[in-house]
Amino acid sequence: VQLQASGGGLVQAGGSLRLSCAASGRTFSSVGWFRQAPGKEREFVAAIRWRLGSTYYADSVKGRFTISGDNAKNTVYLQVNSLKPEDTAVYYCAAARNWLGVSSTRYDYWGQGTQVTVSS
């Protein structure tokens, strides 16, 4: 099982990025994005349930971030718009065999992370 996150970078406040998470090795019930800023705990950002297409967001990113999935490519995207300096973090994608909620402890597989840096 492999999760490959990509798409991070350095952007100015107000800018946008599209993060990608390519999954291989098996099918998953859900894929989520989490982030961890220096000195802070890892926090939930967004998640999508493959079969239902249901999406979930942290309050801090609602209206700015959009998670979507491409079944044919087994890839999940996180479109991040209107970026703020406080969005700076390493963004991780994770996959769960079964949907058990948005807590990071409910995810079975993790990618390596991609750095997002937002300058003011």
Image (cartoon, helix red, strand yellow):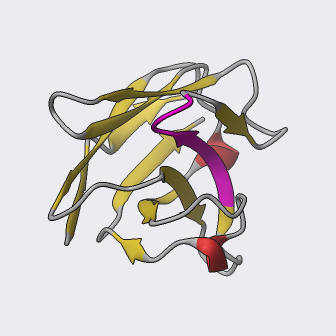
Residue 94, x across and y down, in percent:
44, 63
Left or right of 55: which side holds 101? Answer: right
Q: Locate residue 112 relative to residue 66 in the image: left or right.
A: left
In reply to whether residue 51 is colored magenta, the answer given is yes
Compare residues 81 and 1 and report the one nearer the observer. Answer: 1
Residue drawn at 64 percent across, 80 percent down: 105
What is the x, y in percent for residue 66? 56, 24
Question: Depth check: 85 or 98 in front?
Answer: 98
* Residue at the spot 56% in from the left edge and 30% down from the top edge: 52
Please report the bounds of the magenta region as a residue range: 44-52
Residue 41 appears left or right of 24: right
Res 82 → quadrant:
top right
Which residue is found at the position 56% from the left and 59% from the top? 34
At which x and y percent is residue 109?
Answer: 38, 74
Up the image or down, 21 lies above or below 2; here it is above
Position of the N terminus by quadrant? bottom left
Residue 101 sits in quarter = bottom right
Tell me which secondary structure the magenta stretch mostly adopts.
strand
**In the displayed structure, does residue 48 sit left or right of residue 42?**
left
